[in-house]
Image (cartoon, grey):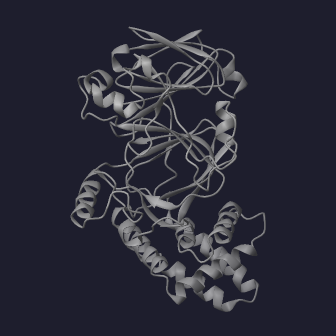
Amino acid sequence: MFVGITNTPKDYAWGSPSAIAELLGRRPSGGPEAELWLGAHPLAPSRIVDPGTAGNFETLDAFIAADPARALGPDRTSDTLPFLLKVLAADQPLSIQAHPSPEQAREGFARENAAGVPLDAGHRMYKDEGAKPELVYALSDTFEALAGFRDLSFTRVLLLELRTYASVGGDQRDADLLQALADKLNGTPDAALRRVLEFAFEGGDEARATMDAVIRAAGRAPSSTSYAREYATLHELAELHPGDPGILVALLMNRVSLPQGQALYLPSGNIHAYLRGLAIEIMAASDNVLRGGLTGKHVDTAELQKVVRFEPVPAPLLRAEGGRTGVEVYRPDVPDFLLVRIAVGAAGAEHGYQLAGEPAEQVPLPGPGILLALGGTVTVNGRASGTQLRPGEAAFVTPDEGELEIAGDGIVFLATVNR
């Protein structure tokens, strides 16, 4: 069964006023449009386009709850949709954040329940018992992000370079502060990263002076430096969030420019912040976010440090599985979700994607799915029924449709479970 779904974009202040509307062929709302949620999350479930075709249910969560065996399949692990698909458009940086593991989420949820913290309280951190690993796929020319702690040797080199700029500028006090910060990175990576985060988050006079020294020295850097992108990011963050300790944390993180058509996978505990761009995002259907700065929302740096993995990692790129020209599968290491991009017809070439090798593509459906069409009109047929999706239209598909045949002229993203 195919059920047409839609939703209203979230109007978070960091959102783009036009990117989502242009992508989906809609009229802009006139305000920021940050995230379009496609799924059954109770905070913003998708609306059913024609309730008469879906048992008169108006929202996807109600449709699923009425008959989870049909909607999610007999081999489901729960009676709720395990993933959430989003279109994300950032014009300004999001908060520095991380998400808990399943065990941490269960403990935190029970702890806040026992403390009597209302689920809708602004300072509530654990809204459910779930982990929230996530994957982001770049639709814009680049999608800019901070993702994971970089190798400490590179951060030491960066700080040495900044110290040189401070010294040349005659700021010996700044040079000494930058050297002291570099010294804090000595020792094991785990201990060094914990030491610097504690230093940044405790917000003392020395931490604030060090942050100012970083910004001043970065301002003296020539455009030819290999760290120009990192320095520009620090300046942008300082202008948007002056004095925020997250600026020092950003100094430790991989600065990623994700090209169109590539993906990042952020597992539990990965510290990250999206900076700018348009993307498809898929995640486990949780709302557990621990924030450490660069936001007006509730920040709890102590709780963030409980869930962060204090280990340097490369930029967490996720490569597509090899296969047919028109089908790319992005498969993380969790069962909650995977993302498939399918290109059919000439529209794929017009939008910067490869053409499919055949006029139609066959794509297995291992469980419930959500389809989003971009760039052209496509026809999707399953074992029992079919649907047509114009650009910007989406549909929920039940697992009894089995393998999907997708034809037409466009791009389709399929979110489904990872089995």
Q: Is residue 186 visible?
A: no
Percent position of residue 132, x then y: 38, 48
Percent position of residue 387, x then y: 50, 13
**Residue at 69% of width from left, 47% of height from top?**
17
Percent position of residue 60, x then y: 40, 31
Q: Quadrant of the N terminus?
A: top left
**Residue at 52% of width from left, 51% of height from top?**
315
**Is residue 298 rendered to the left or right of residue 335?**
right
**Is residue 301 rendered to the left or right of residue 259?**
left
| Residue 259 in which image quadrant | top right
**Tally of numbered tags:** 0
203 over 398 or under it: above or below: below
Q: Is residue 207 visible?
A: yes
**Is residue 91 rendered to the left or right of residue 329?**
right
* Residue projecting furthest to the bottom: 173
Q: Quadrant of the C terminus?
A: top left
371 over 185 or under it: above or below: above
**Is residue 364 rendered to the left or right of residue 247?**
left
Front residue of 185/108: it is 108
